[in-house]
Image: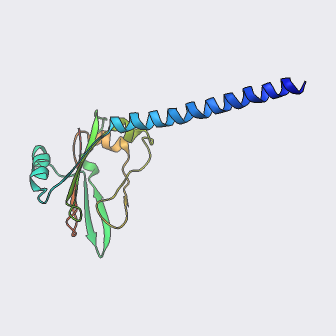
Amino acid sequence: MAEKKKNWLLIILGIVIFVVIVGIAGVVGFGYWMYRQMGVTTMTTEDPAPAFEEARAPFKSQQPYIEMSLDNNEERAVVHHELEKPEKSTVKRLRVLIYDPGDNRLVRLQIPFWLVRLGGSDKHISFDAGGVHGVRLSITPSDLERRGPGLILDQETRGGQRLLIWAE
């Protein structure tokens, strides 16, 4: 009887170990798949101006959907809801261009819009434009879809950090 009990314990232990290994493999696989969905390119440069001019060129006359300013060391954001259309547009991805003068690093990031929507279409989005704290804006992924493709944010801080976000 004790022998049968031992066998069952070994079988249960084997199943538990198998489930844990499959779970870890699933998490790692999902993480890798998510990483492959996002495009991240980093490069070192002393002069990021050409990259920002090239990225900004298609939106030369466009007003950014979000404008951020610094008043009395406090970040303030103005969201131009008047740029929104009554119907939602198809937004495929958000593109982000970031420059940090401290590291002389230019980062290009491409985020699929379904990933932005994954957090919920009614949850507010937080952007950090190089300041001390992220600024919580009263915009949602649904607002960005009503805004449609175009310039979302073009911000340069006093410290020289630059952030450009646009939707495609």
Asked if residue 91 shows in the view, the reply is: no
Query: Residue reaching furthest bottom?
Result: 72
168, 13: nearer the viewer? 13
132, 85: nearer the viewer? 132
Where is residue 100, by image quadrant? Answer: bottom left
Where is residue 104, by image quadrant? Answer: bottom left
Colour mode of the rendering: rainbow
Is residue 5 toward the left or the right of residue 90 in the image? Answer: right
Is residue 142 toward the left or the right of residue 159 in the image? Answer: right
**154 lies above or below 94:** below
**Numbered marks: total:** 0
Q: Residue at x 30, y 74 (%)?
A: 73
Q: Give residue 74's position: percent from left, percent from top.
A: 33, 71
60, 46: nearer the viewer? 46
Query: Residue reaching furthest front?
Result: 3
Q: Residue at x 88, y 27 (%)?
A: 2
Is residue 124 toward the left or the right of residue 52 in the image? Answer: right
Q: Residue at x 47, y 37 (%)?
A: 28
- Quadrant location, the C terminus: top left
Is residue 138 toward the left or the right of residue 155 in the image? Answer: right
Asked if residue 12 shows in the view, the reply is: yes
Q: Give residue 72's position: percent from left, percent from top.
A: 29, 76
Where is residue 129, by image quadrant? Answer: bottom left
Query: Residue reaching furthest right?
Result: 1
- Quadrant location, the N terminus: top right
Q: Give residue 98's position: percent from left, percent from top.
A: 23, 54
Q: Residue at x 78, y 30 (%)?
A: 9
Q: Give residue 33's position: percent from left, percent from top.
A: 39, 33
